[in-house]
Image (spheres, rainbow, N blue to C red):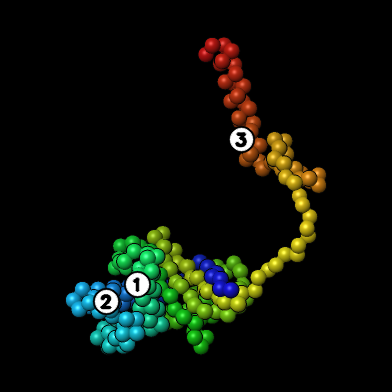
Amino acid sequence: MEKAFKYRMYPNREQRILLAKTFGCTRFVYNHYLAKRKDAYEKDGITFSYSACAKDLVSLKKEYEWLKEVDSVALQSSVKNLDTAYINFFRKKAEYPRFKSKKTHRYSYTTKYTNGNIELYENKVKLPKIGLVKIKKTRTPKGRLLSATVSQVPSGKYYVSLCYTDVEEVLFPLTYNETGIDLGIKDFIILSNGEKVENPKYLKKSIEKLKKLQKQQSRKTKGGR
């Protein structure tokens, strides 16, 4: 079973610059090969396959030296994502792939785990070309790490989603006990075993306010106002 664990990231100034470069480079590669595949089909009626794009990526990095400044696996994943978009289109599961725009202010890229290039620590995560980035760790996954997807949302916040396989599931023992639940006014919940759950404070205040409004409405009705 595969499962993703998402954490808030707090990159420093230098890391934010590197992340912006990676977002930009992966977007450039995606759009470049989308244009190339469209052009090949419209002009010659042929499909520029994933393997052809992946092979051409080597030449593209020589032509644009700045592509070498970012994680090479992230660039390859961008080509793979484009191929997946085409597959989903031909299977009628999605619309025709669109060019990515930086104006959306929502960016992401995915990189694969290989030879310890991605690691999760107590309060940091190691990412290729980025280094150790501070995170807010909420839980510790147990399994085999597959990939990391780094994203930035319109609010400017950064996140990393770590995908694991062979994740251990926490199973709770079956008790075979049945419990009835009754919603009340004085008590919020009354269980069939007699246990009572009090109303939350905000609910009590709302009920009291409602009673006052009902009394006021009743007086107005009796008085003709």
Q: Is residue 156 visible?
A: no
Q: Where residue 133 sits in the image (x, y, percent)?
A: 49, 75
Mark number, residue 182: none
- Amino acid at pointer 1: Tyr
Q: To which quarter of the image does residue 102 belong? A: bottom left
The residue shown at (49%, 77%) is: 147
- Amino acid at pointer 3: Ser
Q: Where residue 155 sits in the image (x, y, percent)?
A: 41, 59
Q: Secondary structure at mark 1?
A: helix
Q: Secondary structure at mark 3?
A: helix
Q: Is residue 224 left or right of residue 74?
A: right
Q: Where residue 56 sits in the image (x, y, percent)?
A: 29, 86
Cα separation, mark 2 vs mark 3, equals 60 Å
Nearest to N terminus: mark 3 or mark 1:
1
Q: Which residue in the protein does label 1 denote?
A: 86
Q: Where residue 75 sits in the image (x, y, percent)?
A: 36, 80
Q: Is residue 99 visible?
A: yes
Does 84 sit above or below residue 188?
Answer: below
Does 13 sit above or below residue 184?
Answer: below
The residue shown at (28%, 79%) is: 47
